[in-house]
């Protein structure tokens, strides 16, 4: 099982054993990771699961689609490595992925 | 009233609102006992995918659940499933179960949700006539979602149209019966109704507007035809009713809590009893951006009120109150709705309807009060901010696609 490491805005790391096929957002919600709200449950409708992806994994998490891009455009504190975690599906390749949550999702 | 040291919080209802309240209580540091009472056999799960990806078979059941079973144990949340509460005894501060026994509470959250409105016609008891509300409904419907089967959907609301989209994509023959003269008549404007009518018609759905269903006819106990008031009979292997929901307010009303079309709550999701809160579909709440109260049937509302109730119990600052928002997925078209359009005096369309990418803005006295955004997330997100700020927005700027929504939002701020 791939391990995903959630880092909060203060730098605290929470490693989680994730399941292939679930998204980075779902894994966070099921494990009560603070800092990811995911109000719409993964429908790419709310932009409250914003995370910063560790640069080393940017090539592995895939490209964001247009819908996600335009949602992110309006999120707060967006960076080049910003993604909506509901749009990142977990695979073995993502073992060790570090994502950092922003201070606030709203 | 300080309830943060309450010994036990009881939550009636295991839907989105109840699940959120529990999660937020623990997040806000509540250390006492929590008991969740649910009528269904399943732990709390997401309902929106039931008429979308889950119904289509694209999303596994395990992905519907908010939390793994272990989470409830780890967080010391007692779950009483397949249990019905028969009454709330406010003077004894306890709930009574239908099958006997009672449970004391210090704080109570009523998150009883809503139930599908029953078809008021003859033949509803026939086999293969379904509602679409819970996981168990989909368990019955899904095996019959087979290519070539004839499905009649009653009601062209969101549930009916989402189910129609799934069924068409799976190759069923779909007829939608709608009493009103347009689809989505209760929830949106003619411009959006026309768009969705065309979308479904292009995909091969037979949409019948102004159609009055008079009865369902059966053969051997199974539904065989939908009979219209004008005598026409439409052959059906399966009938799906989606004619709206009824809030489950009975427990609250019988306990003497003030109700209208829902359990009346304040900005903290608190009822007239300081120990009792209500959250989700079953409430009538202040609609802060609209200077009135109303009932919202949405995920946003369930989550927000779940959080509000938990925060009030824990004496935490009140969480942000968002403007109402909704979404609907049909085929490859995502509709995102912000605000409530009732009472608008102007509709402005931006974008290209024929490209399935446009938005309808609703204004009242020059202020934006709602948007229906079709495959247009920037219009949706920017409008949420504009609606909450109450800013004046120029209609000719909204319709001008050379001006980005970011600019429009920034200018109005």
Image (cartoon, coloured by chain):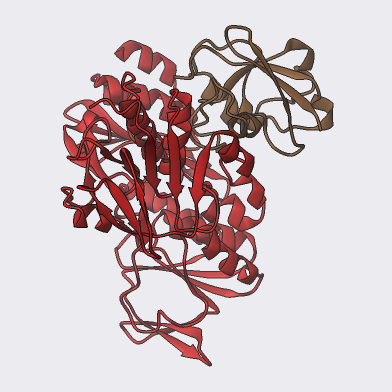
Chain colours: A brown, B red
Horizontally, is B207 left or right of B56 in the view? Answer: left
Which quadrant holds the C terminus of chain B? Answer: top left
- Return the x and y of residue B260 as percentages of the image width and height: 17, 51
The reply, left or right, for residue A37 in relation to residue B226 is right
What residue appears at the point 84 percent right and 27 percent down from the top-left corner? A93
Q: Residue furthest top?
A: A10
Q: Residue at x 59, y 39 (%)?
A: B73
Point out residue B130 in the picture as x, y percentages from the top left corner. Answer: 48, 70
Q: Residue at x 33, y 33 (%)?
A: B309
Is B260 or B196 nearer to us in this picture?
B260
Image coordinates of residue B164 in percent, x first then y, are 51, 61
Between residues B64 and B339, which one lies in front from this camera angle? B64
Q: Quadrant of residue B325?
A: top left
Residue B343, visible in the rendered structure: no
Q: Is residue B235 above or below residue B9?
A: below
* x, y percent for residue A11: 63, 7
Q: Nearer the viewer, residue A31 or B333?
A: A31
- Is A33 located above or below residue B94 in the figure? above
Q: Quadrant of the N terminus of chain B?
A: top left
Q: Can residue B284 be seen from the camera position used here?
A: yes
Q: Is residue B269 above or below residue A13?
A: below
Residue B110 or residue B335, whichever sits in front: B110
Q: Residue furthest bottom?
A: B220
Q: How many marks?
A: 0
Indicate whether A59 appears above or below B297: above
């Amino acid at each position: 099982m791939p391990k995903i490491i959630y880092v909060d805005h203060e730098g605290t790391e929470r490693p989680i054993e994730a399941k292939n096929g679930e998204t980075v957002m779902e894994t966070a919600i099921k494990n009560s990771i603070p800092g990811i709200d995911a109000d719409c449950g993964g429908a790419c409708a709310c932009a409250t699961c914003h995370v910063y992806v560790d640069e080393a994994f940017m090539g592995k998490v895939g490209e964001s689609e247009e819908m996600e891009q335009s949602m992110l455009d309006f999120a707060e504190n967006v960076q080049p490595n910003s993604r909506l975690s509901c749009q990142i599906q977990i695979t073995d390749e993502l073992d060790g992925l570090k994502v950092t949550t922003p201070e606030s999702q709203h | 009233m300080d309830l943060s040291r309450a010994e036990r919080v009881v939550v009636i209802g295991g839907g989105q609102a109840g699940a959120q309240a529990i999660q937020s209580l623990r997040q806000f540091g509540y250390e006492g006992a929590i008991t969740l009472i649910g009528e269904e056999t399943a732990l709390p799960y997401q309902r929106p995918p039931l008429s979308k990806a889950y119904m289509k078979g694209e999303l596994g059941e395990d992905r519907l659940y908010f939390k793994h079973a272990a989470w409830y144990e780890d967080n010391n949340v007692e779950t009483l499933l397949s249990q019905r509460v028969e009454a709330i005894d406010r003077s004894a501060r306890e709930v009574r179960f239908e099958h006997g026994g009672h449970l004391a509470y210090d704080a109570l959250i009523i998150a009883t949700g809503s139930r599908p409105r029953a078809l008021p016609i003859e033949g509803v008891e026939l086999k293969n006539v379904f509602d679409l509300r819970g996981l168990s409904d989909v368990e019955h419907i899904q095996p019959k979602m087979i290519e070539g089967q004839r499905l009649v959907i009653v009601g062209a609301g969101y549930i009916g149209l989402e189910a129609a989209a799934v069924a068409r994509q799976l190759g069923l023959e779909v007829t939608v019966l709608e009493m009103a003269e347009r689809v989505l008549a209760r929830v949106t404007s003619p411009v959006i109704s026309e768009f969705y009518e065309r979308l479904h018609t292009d995909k091969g759905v037979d949409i019948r507007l102004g159609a009055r269903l008079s009865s369902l006819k059966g053969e051997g106990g199974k539904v065989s035809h939908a009979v219209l008031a004008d005598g026409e009979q439409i052959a059906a292997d399966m009938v799906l009713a989606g004619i709206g929901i009824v809030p489950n307010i009975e427990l609250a009303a019988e306990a003497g809590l003030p109700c209208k079309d829902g359990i009346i709550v304040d900005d903290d999701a608190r009822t007239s009893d300081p120990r009792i809160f209500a959250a989700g579909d079953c409430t009538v709440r202040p609609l802060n951006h609209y200077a009135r109260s109303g009932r919202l049937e949405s995920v946003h509302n369930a989550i927000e009120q779940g959080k509000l109730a938990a925060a009030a119990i824990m004496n935490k600052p009140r969480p942000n109150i968002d403007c109402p928002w909704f979404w609907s997925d049909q085929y490859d078209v995502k509709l995102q709705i912000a605000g409530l359009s009732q009472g608008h005096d102007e509709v402005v369309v931006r974008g290209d309807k024929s490209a399935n990418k446009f938005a309808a803005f609703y204004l009242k006295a020059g202020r934006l009060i709602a948007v229906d955004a079709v495959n247009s997330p920037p219009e949706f997100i920017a409008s949420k901010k504009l609606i909450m700020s109450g800013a004046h927005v120029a209609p000719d700027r909204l319709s001008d696609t050379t001006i980005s929504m970011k600019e429009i939002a920034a200018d109005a701020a």
